[in-house]
Image: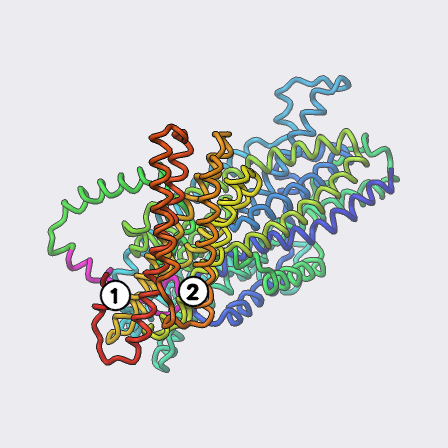
């Protein structure tokens, strides 16, 4: 059995590497989003600042995750085998859970995940021991095994951190924005210097308290030497001379900020980069041990058991695990290097950061989340309360305030979700809240604080206007729901895994290793599939000024693949309904949904594209709108055909009559011929030689078939379902033909207009 437990230690070590990777991917959102969202610098520069912070935090970190040893459960009530199974189930559950959240692009709390995994695993093993016939202990003895008070404190901390962070972010940033307004550049000399000094002072204090002070927790004075001892004395001096230290700090940063501004440098850029470094360092100095605390505790447990002569693992008490143990510096630095490597090369990091940036961005764009009844109710409630609240103030006062919240110029830079004022506010408010919680020894999650502060500041910036509020609120509620699900799922998953290991031991170990490999493989495939399906939101990216010629070229490139797909969908619909082939129709419907999803890229970027039209050439924007409308109508007609043919066959309605099938096959041949002509036009980008012969044939054939259908109904040859299906196919085929022909005419007139000196859009009105 000694080899079995040694194997578990090796597995735990390997799992800790994966835990570092998935943990960094999740927590990168905490210190990257403000810098990335405001585009304070290139992504490379931002990553360098974050990497330096992570490395320095790992180098200075020397604490141990005590909650892994004795924070949630009492080791003296467990045997060595129990402890090893608890730790292994925690690592397995935590890795799988975080990887799922990372794949879905939702940030969650690594602290909550780890704590509830520990709680679930310890609870499961404790219940097995209590209910065992050998022990037969009363149920209330569970409080001896599990520290319930710690659990309730964590849950309360979750609620408080969410509410306080959001409220603080909204109220504090409201006054910051009032002082700066959106035209903040002209106020940098005075307001900017003071605000930068406040921000940098609070973040420096945060760096010292959160990044250094908490790393010394659990150490005795005998264990502190050299630099660590100096830090402890320095922190004690700060606590005894708090206001003096704060005054020195503020004065120093005020002088530095004034020098920066005098040299013409935007001081807020430095604030945001410094804040990114600060949060990254604090993260590595504290949250790092969340990921390696369990493996180190496992190694220490194994050493305690091994040094005692390797007695029966099921009877060896682990009370010695309650002692404080220092994490080796080499392990922490190695862990920091893995996290830096992950930060630079993991694509999922971008996926996580995009969620928060999407919910907090100032400019317009496609919404990632759909609205629901709850979010709509919340928005209506606040609109009602807001209308009554503002009636309490005089109109002149409100108008004066409103001037500072109006965006006098639209952000034109691509990728800028919000400005440097809000980015600096996000980092500063988060730093202050985390510092206060650290001093007061209150448990909270850095993910909860940074995310909710960001949501609060975006609310006070009017980023959640009536155009986007329901979608943003829905997204925030979904993320919060995911946080609470994290705790529940972590508790349940770790509990089941621990029980499985307890009863099946080596067989359970082999199965769980295989299961982890399978989950990671499926996660990798799912992520790649999601990336492949991801809609390109900016089909006109890089087109600064939209001209008529550019519009023609770009729309040709967009329309060509769509028409090719529509041709295939139409052909499969006719084949499927005439042959009553359910498989073809189901696959056809799936392919259509992909076309519809890809068309959303054009839909989502419609307003952005039109805004890029040159002022002296509005025809380009008008033409693009007409092409968009015609394409949308073609897709809607194809939707009806694909859906109704599938509905007819899947519900086992009567098949079409011989004459109906014959008519549809003739129509299909004409439609395919029409599609081929249009495809050649989009390839050659030449509409001058197009004739209306094929269109006239199709329209004439559709009218003939409709007449035949009426005659068939009179003679009671066709049933109700068949009739409605045929009429839908014929009517939508006619619409597709007419819309394609309208697009061709648009292109013909536009191409002849390119060389014309006219600037009106009369040729587009029909």
Is 175 or 663 nearer to us in this picture?
663
Residue at image coords 78%, 31%: 504
Residue at image coords 43%, 44%: 641
**Magenta highlight on residue 271:** no
What percent of the width, then of the height, locates residue 375? Answer: 35, 40
**Magenta residues: mostly which secondary structure?**
loop
Q: Which mark is residue 539?
A: 2
Is 644 or 64 nearer to us in this picture?
644
What percent of the width, then of the height, locates residue 51? Answer: 58, 66
First of labels 1, 2 by sequence position: 2
Q: Which mark is residue 344?
A: none
Instruction: Examine the rendering and report whether any part of residue 487 can be seen.
Output: yes
Q: Which residue is mark 1?
A: 764
What percent of the width, then of the height, locates residue 123? Answer: 64, 30
Q: Is residue 243 left or right of residue 310?
A: left
Q: Residues within 10 Å of mark 1 (few under 14, many from 20)?
A: some
- Start-end of magenta stretch: 399-421
Q: How many marks?
A: 2
């Amino acid at each position: 059995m000694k080899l079995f437990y040694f194997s578990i230690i090796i597995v735990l070590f390997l799992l800790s590497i994966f835990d570092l990777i998935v943990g960094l991917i999740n927590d990168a959102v905490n210190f990257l989003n403000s810098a990335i969202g405001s585009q304070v610098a290139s992504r490379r520069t931002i990553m360098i600042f974050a990497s330096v912070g992570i490395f320095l935090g790992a180098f200075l970190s020397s604490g141990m995750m005590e909650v892994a040893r004795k924070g949630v459960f009492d080791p003296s009530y467990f045997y060595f085998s129990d402890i090893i199974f608890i730790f292994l189930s925690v690592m397995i559950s935590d890795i799988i859970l975080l990887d799922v959240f990372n794949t879905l692009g939702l940030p969650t709390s690594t602290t909550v995940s780890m704590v509830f995994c520990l709680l679930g695993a310890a609870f499961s093993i404790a219940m097995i021991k209590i209910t065992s016939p050998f022990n037969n202990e009363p149920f209330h003895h569970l409080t001896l095994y599990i520290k319930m008070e710690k659990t309730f404190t964590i849950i309360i901390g979750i609620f408080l951190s969410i509410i306080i962070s959001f409220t603080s972010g909204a109220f504090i940033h409201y006054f910051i924005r009032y002082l700066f307004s959106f035209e903040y550049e002209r106020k940098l000399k005075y307001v900017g210097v003071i605000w930068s000094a406040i921000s940098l002072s609070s973040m420096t204090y945060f760096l010292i308290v959160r990044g250094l002070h908490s790393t010394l927790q659990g150490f005795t004075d005998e264990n502190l030497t050299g630099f660590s001892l100096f830090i402890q004395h320095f922190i004690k001096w700060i606590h005894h001379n708090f206001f003096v230290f704060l005054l020195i700090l503020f004065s120093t940063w005020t002088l530095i900020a004034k020098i920066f501004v005098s040299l013409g440098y935007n001081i807020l850029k430095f604030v945001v980069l410094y804040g990114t470094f600060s949060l990254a360092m604090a993260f590595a100095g504290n949250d790092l041990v969340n990921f390696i605390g369990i493996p180190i505790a496992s190694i220490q447990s194994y050493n305690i058991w091994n040094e005692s002569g390797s007695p029966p693992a099921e009877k060896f008490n682990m009370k010695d695990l309650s002692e404080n143990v220092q994490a080796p510096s080499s392990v922490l630095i190695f862990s920091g290097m893995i996290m830096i490597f992950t930060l630079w090369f993991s694509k999922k990091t971008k996926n996580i950061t995009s969620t928060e940036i999407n919910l907090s961005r100032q400019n317009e764009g496609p919404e990632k989340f759909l609205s629901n009844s709850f979010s709509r109710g919340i928005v209506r409630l606040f609109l009602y309360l807001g209308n009554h609240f503002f009636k309490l103030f005089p109109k002149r006062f409100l108008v004066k305030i409103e001037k500072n919240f109006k965006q006098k110029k639209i952000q034109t830079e691509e990728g800028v979700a919000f400005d440097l004022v809000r980015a600096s506010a996000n980092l500063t408010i988060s730093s202050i809240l985390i510092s206060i919680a650290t001093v007061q020894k209150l448990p909270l999650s850095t993910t909860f604080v940074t995310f909710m502060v960001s949501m609060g500041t975006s609310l006070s910036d009017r980023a959640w206007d009536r155009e986007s509020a329901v979608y943003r609120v829905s997204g925030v509620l979904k993320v919060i729901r995911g946080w609470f699900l994290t705790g529940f799922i972590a508790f349940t998953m770790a509990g089941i895994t621990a029980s499985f290991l307890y009863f099946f031991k080596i067989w359970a170990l082999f199965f769980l290793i295989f299961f982890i490999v399978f989950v990671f493989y499926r996660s990798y495939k799912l992520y790649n599939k999601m990336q492949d399906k991801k809609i390109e939101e900016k089909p006109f990216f890089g087109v600064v000024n939209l001209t008529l010629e550019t519009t023609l070229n770009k729309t040709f490139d967009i329309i060509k693949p769509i028409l090719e797909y529509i041709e295939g969908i139409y052909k499969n619909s006719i084949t499927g309904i005439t042959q009553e082939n359910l498989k073809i129709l189901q696959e056809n419907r799936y392919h259509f949904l992909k076309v519809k999803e890809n068309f959303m890229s054009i839909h989502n970027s419609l307003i952005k594209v039109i805004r890029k039209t040159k002022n002296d050439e509005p025809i380009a924007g008008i033409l693009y709108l007409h092409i968009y409308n015609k394409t949308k109508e073609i897709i809607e007609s194809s939707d009806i055909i694909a859906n109704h043919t599938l509905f007819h066959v899947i519900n086992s309605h009567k098949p079409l009559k011989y004459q109906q099938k014959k008519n549809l096959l003739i129509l299909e041949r004409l439609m395919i011929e029409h599609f081929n002509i249009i495809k050649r036009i989009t390839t050659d980008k030449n509409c001058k030689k197009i004739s209306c012969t094929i269109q006239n044939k199709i329209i004439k054939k559709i009218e003939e078939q409709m007449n035949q259908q009426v005659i068939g109904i009179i003679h009671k040859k066709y049933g109700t379902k068949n009739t409605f299906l045929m009429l839908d196919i014929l009517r939508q085929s006619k619409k597709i033909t007419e819309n394609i022909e309208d697009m061709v005419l648009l292109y013909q007139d536009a191409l002849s207009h390119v060389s014309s000196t006219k600037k009106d859009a009369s040729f587009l009105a029909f």
